[in-house]
Amino acid sequence: QPYFVTPADGSVFAMAGLYEFWRDPTLPGDHANAWWVTCSVITTEAETTPLAVAPAEGPGALADIHPRMPLMLTPD
């Protein structure tokens, strides 16, 4: 089941991730599929603290949705 998760104050959040552009050495450089972009999201253990705005029914914490969650970055 999909869930829409956002900060309680309506702000945006940044997730930690990695990306890389790489060339497939088996294809010529001008081939349409010669270049690839791969990415991954860094995850951490899901928070068990109650959600600031929990729905009347459903999950009360992120850990109730899934045992892992994206690693959130702070401004510093």
Image: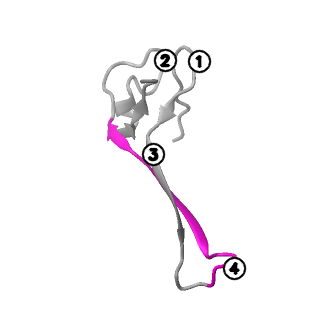
Q: Which residue is mark 3?
A: 17
If the image is split into quadrants, where does the C terminus sit?
Answer: top left
Q: Which residue is mark 1?
A: 10
Q: Up-down: is 67 above or below 47?
A: below
- Badge 2 local density, few (<14 within 10 Å), some, or many (20+)? few
Tell me the magenta residue range: 28-45
34 or 15, nearer to the observer: 34
Q: Determine whether label 2 and label 4 are within 8 Å by CB.
A: no
Q: Mark 3 belongs to which amino acid?
A: Gly
How far across and down, in percent of the image, does residue 5 sit?
52, 29
Q: Which residue is mark 2?
A: 56
Q: Which residue is mark 4?
A: 30
Q: Earlier in the sequence, mark 3 or mark 1?
A: 1
Cα distance between the residues tagged 2 and 3: 32 Å
Q: Earlier in the sequence, mark 2 or mark 4?
A: 4
Cα distance between the residues tagged 2 and 1: 19 Å
Q: Earlier in the sequence, mark 4 or mark 1?
A: 1
Cα distance between the residues tagged 2 and 4: 55 Å
